[in-house]
Amino acid sequence: MSSIRRFDHVGITVADLDRALAFFVGLGLEVEGRMPMEGEFVDTVTGIPGSRSEMVMLRPPGGGTGLELSRFTRPDHEPGSPAAMSNELGLRNVMFEVDDLDAVVERLAADVYRLVGGVGQYEDVWRMAYVRGPEGIIVALAERID
């Protein structure tokens, strides 16, 4: 029986690739590669004949699980709700551990990215907040406090 060897990445489709890229690079992710994607392989895997997209793979410093951002140029994308809440079906959030939660939240607020709720504390272990990132992506930020 086959088993999973590792968790490689999460993929998110966006309309404005450069804006989403700037947001996640600003959080500290590093660009691993950027390329156009089209052809028989992509059509087969996505099930979208004649598709064309541009994708960027991001990873944390030192490697680890990545974040793939894609923008389809063909066919037109189907927009989701930019104000989706955590209880809606689909991708709930992308979470990152940070060193200084307050500083990150303050910096993102200066770039018009706001908290979804507030900063919460789980026991004496984590401080955490959800930020509404580009295109409504909920980004969970957590700081270990133990």
Image (tube, grey):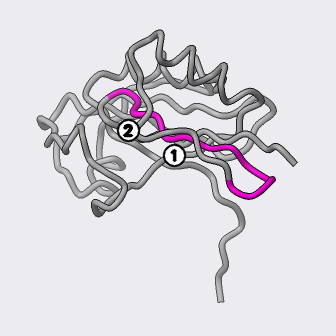
User: Horizontal and vertical percent for residue 24?
Assistant: 53, 25
In this view, the residue in front, 135 or 54, is 135
Q: Quadrant of the N terminus?
A: bottom right
Query: Residue pushed farthest right?
Result: 146
In this view, the residue in front, 62 or 3, is 62
- Position of 104 relative to 41 (above/below): above
Residue 24 visible in the displayed image: yes
Q: Residue at x 44, y 46 (%)?
A: 11
- Residues at marks 1 and 2 touching, judged by CB atoms closer than 8 Å: yes
Q: Residues within 10 Å of mark 1 (few under 14, many from 20)?
A: some
Q: Residue 51's quadrant in the figure?
A: top left
Task: Please check the rendered image and state whether residue 132 is part of the magenta-colored stretch, yes or no.
Answer: yes
Q: Residue at x 29, y 63 (%)?
A: 89
Amino acid at the residue labelled 1: Val
Task: Please check the rendered image and state whether residue 43 is part of the magenta-colored stretch, yes or no.
Answer: no
Amino acid at the residue labelled 2: Ile
Query: Residue pushed farthest bottom?
Result: 1
Q: What kind of element bears circle 2?
A: loop
- Position of 119 relative to 104 (above/below): below
| Mark carried by residue 137 | 2
Which residue is labeled 1 in the image?
94
In this view, the residue in front, 116 or 26, is 116
User: Horizontal and vertical percent for residue 33?
Assistant: 57, 25
Q: Residue 80's quadrant in the figure?
A: top left
- Position of 21 relative to 141 (above/below): above
Q: Residue at x 25, y 33 (%)?
A: 72
* Residues in magenta, as a range: 122-134
